[in-house]
Amino acid sequence: MALANTTDSTGLSHQMRKRPFRRPGENLIMVALVLCAAVSIATTFAIVFVLFADAIGFFREVSFWHFFNFANDWQTLFDPRSFGVWELVAGTVNVTLWSMVIALPLGLAAAIYLSEYAHPQTRRFLKPLLELLAGVPTVVYAYFALTFISDDILLPLFGENISFFNSLSASVMLAVMILPTIASVSEDAMASVPRDLREAAYGLGATRLEVAFRVVFPAAISGIMAAILLAIARVIGETMIVAVAAGSTPNLTLWPHESIQTMTGYMLQVALGDAARGTTDYTSLFAVGALLFVMTFALNVAAQIIVRRFREAYE
Amino acid sequence: MSIRVRSTNPTDDEAREALQGRPAEEHVPSHNITKPEGEPAFSISDLNFWYGTKQALTNVGLDIPRKKVTALIGPSGCGKSTLLRCLNRMNDLIPGVTIEGNVRYRSADIYGPGVDPVEVRRRIGMVFQKPNPFPKSIYENVAFGARVNGFRGNLDDLVEGSLQRAALWDEVKGDLKQSGLALSGGQQQRLCIARALANNPDVILMDEPCSALDPIATLKIEDLIRELSTDYTIVVVTHNMQQAARVSDYTAFMLTDEEITGQLIEYAPTEMMFTQPGDQRTEDYISGRFG
Amino acid sequence: MSFVEATPDAITLRAEGRVARRQAWSRASRWILLGATGVGLVVLVILGIDNAIVGIPSLDWDFLSSYPSRKAEIAGIRSSIFGSVWVLVFTVAFAIPVAVGSAIWMEEFAPQNAILTTVRLNIANLAGVPSIIYGILGLAVFVRLMELGPSILAGALTLALMILPMTVITSVEAINQVPPSIREGSLALGATRWQTVWYHVLPGAMPGIMTGTILAVARAAGETAALIMIGAFTFIAFDPALSFSGLLDSFTTLPIQVYNWTLRPQTEFRANAAAGIIVLMIAVIGLNALALVVRDRLRQS
Ligand SMILES: Nc1ncnc2c1ncn2[C@@H]1O[C@H](COP(=O)(O)OP(=O)(O)O)[C@@H](O)[C@H]1O
Ligand SMILES: [Mg+2]
């Protein structure tokens, strides 16, 4: 019952909140509600526990130094096996890099258009349409990346110079997938730049283009940074597109035309195989998963901190 | 651009009627609207303005004299800002507005075909109610207009000259790199004036430039307005009648009543307006009986 | 230096020289930016049309009603449709009560202290966890620890956890939009806080909660990686049993089937994948449209 005696607002609602419950059954309901809220906390604990418990098992077999040594390959199929995670990280960085190269200009252009150029009605119509891109199941993008982008476009275009599975085809579809994230979050940031600043610039005889790029964009830059971090976190965690189209050959390269393997791609590969419980193959899944979790967690937290600072600056 | 500009000609009255749902007002030139001597800077006639379907100005007509300070007074919501912003086409930026009538600046029709709002705003600068420096350094704030326009001269001189003209130079010359936002409210407003001056405008429009400032900062801005009036045409909106009396040469009194929104009641040399108002409503307002 | 030059009296306010150039750039930029905004959509439309051309010939009743097969011509999505529907029904059944319960607690009953802040931050972070991590969680907890195997139940529980953060966030927003006056009115009439929530707040928040739920279902309907992690990548040629023990049957879903066909090197399977994608996209777009309709209803009332 202590939960009911909240410490918040004064006055009317405070007094009401102190009113005792009339029906004893409501105590039970309260317990149920608290349990519901506890599920998400428990989920976090479970994720951390599951990942790190088995990751520790992995690091009993494979040294930490071996795992993070640049010199080591990621070679788990035949002996001598080797678990140098940088090859997988490089694969992830590779698709992140190229998808950002494509998505950033387009996404930011869309954000600027929606926030500074579009008529409110156009925006109301265009924004949900753009957000549909984020709602397309990634397995669909994966299929497009392999069959249309790679098979129908890139291979005829570059022939021998590009491998059938390549990072570029995955990056193109990843870019389409995260466009709305970049556009939407950046647009929110630009929309919260005070009207005052725009009027000041227009009043000085700036054109729309100059207002957008010299005033609104710089003023919203931290919100835009947050959008980029969120987009990167999504790319890093995306599995199907890279597993299908980018290949399954760990490769320490940032070139877009080569076949690579990302962290998520490797994890899916293990799941599709039948690694017995307790083997290094099986536990490596958790070690890579833990690293992935730490990376996406850090990016999300950083984005949240930036967004909060940004809001405080303008509210 | 979602702005619809109409010129006054008889056939438009039907459209206007449809929009308003009532016949267009006949424009009756009031004897309380004085015509200043000499060539006016602005010549406004039959100006009507709508936000969507909501009318904000009705048949406004007046001449604003050159190199003088003209004050727009009237109770809040009577359309002062709207009128002011019609003078440099700032209202174009609001979706769904309709402007009808004639606004001439030195005999050029501001809403005429081929007129570029950017060119208009470059020549007719604006200072806003709330000081709104860019989140950039003092230097960059003042240099903004010059930079976007690819200014070829000596930027340092321009910044210094503008800050001096805005009576801010002595207070900030030590650190032009500090953020414009670090200044006090009064200093920020003078920075905004310097920023406008750096564009080398002919006219400066000010929308309640002192309403966010303390009395001492207000006095400084008022002194500055008087001083600038030797070289610039200044139109200043204020709801402070003492301020209008102190700084302006001419005063326009606007009012929204039950029937007509945003009408110009009286326009006269300031001294005359405050000593012998020609309209009962003006007298009521300046003697503090309403508003 | 002189600030006010003597200007000739008659002026035009036309853009000339530099101003004209700047305006020309500015006007051009509108179309360039609009073009960039449209690129993603255009790509999607082109891919959609291309996909329709490949997929529509295979899309017939046989395709919908046949089990998967080694032979592309007779393979269908019957078991994937059953699997998808079954898993989604249970996903919603698990996730929504928990999400709404959490949201009610957070908005109506929670003490305003560090615990609530922690719960909020935790949910925001869970929303950013990649789906494959939820798959690992499901594998370790539901499949292995609870020994449910790669079953419908394990899949639904995994997806329920995955969509939980999103549904909590939308439910919180929906509850927030119920005006406080409604609560105060009810409380003033002597209702208990729970009665107030049950009879006044929840009905008011319902359209918002439903919109969020539908969008979450759309997301879960397309999820592949998490289900493959728990071992759902299997060949299924039977309908799930309509019983409790049926919950422990293994299953496949539409996106998994599409993935399966995508991986096949033979080109005939490409048409099957394309046809599967058409069905999947109709479902996803339909759910999104439904969410929009529900949201508009909310706006109206
Ligand atoms: N952007 C706008 N959209 C719709 N109505 C507006 C807008 N700006 C002002 N108005 C309305 O127009 C009328 C005149 O406003 P304004 O010119 O700002 O008055 P003042 O500056 O004299 O206080 C007011 O009724 C106001 O509510
Ligand atoms: Mg005003």
Image (cartoon, rainbow, N blue to C red):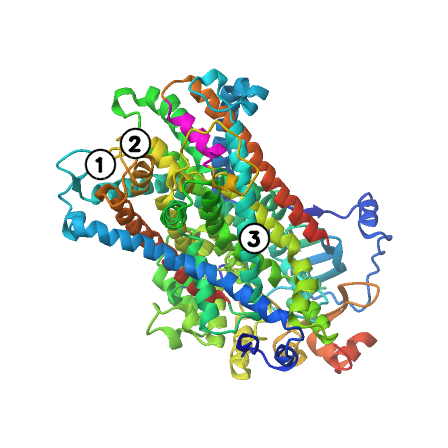
Circles 1 and 2 in contact, beta carbons < 8 Å: yes
Q: Which residue is drawn at 71% across and 72% down?
A: C191
Q: Is mark 1 on a helix, strand or loop?
A: loop
Between the C-alphas of marks 1 and 2, the distance is: 10 Å
Q: Residue at x 36, y 42 (%)?
A: A100
Nearer to me, B175 or A14: A14
Q: Residue furthest right?
A: B23
Amino acid type, mark 3: Ile
Circles 2 and 3 in contact, beta carbons < 8 Å: no
Crowding at dot 1, Cα within 10 Å, few <14 / some 14-19 / many 20+, comes out as many
Mark 2, residue position: A247
Q: Is the residue B183 above or below the residue B110 in the image?
A: below
| Chain bearing mark 3 | C
Q: Is mark 3 on a helix, strand or loop?
A: helix
Amino acid type, mark 2: Gly
Mark 3, residue position: C96
Specify whether disc 2 shares its chain with disc 3: no
Between the C-alphas of marks 3 and 1, the distance is: 42 Å
Give the numbered dot on residue A251.
1
Q: Which residue is drawn at 84% across and 56% down?
A: B25
Residue B129 appears in view: no
Front label number (2 vs 3): 3
Whether ligand 1 has any atom under 8 Å from the Cβ at mark 1 is answered as no
Q: Residue at x 40, y 73 (%)?
A: B169
Nearer to me, A243 or C49: A243
Q: Position of residue B271 (x, y in %)?
A: 70, 78
Q: Is the residue B81 above or below the residue B240 in the image?
A: above
Q: Position of residue B65 (x, y in %)?
A: 65, 65
Amino acid type, mark 1: Asn
Give the numbered dot on residue A217.
none
What's the magenta bit mostly, secondary-structure-wise? helix
Residue A204 appears in view: yes
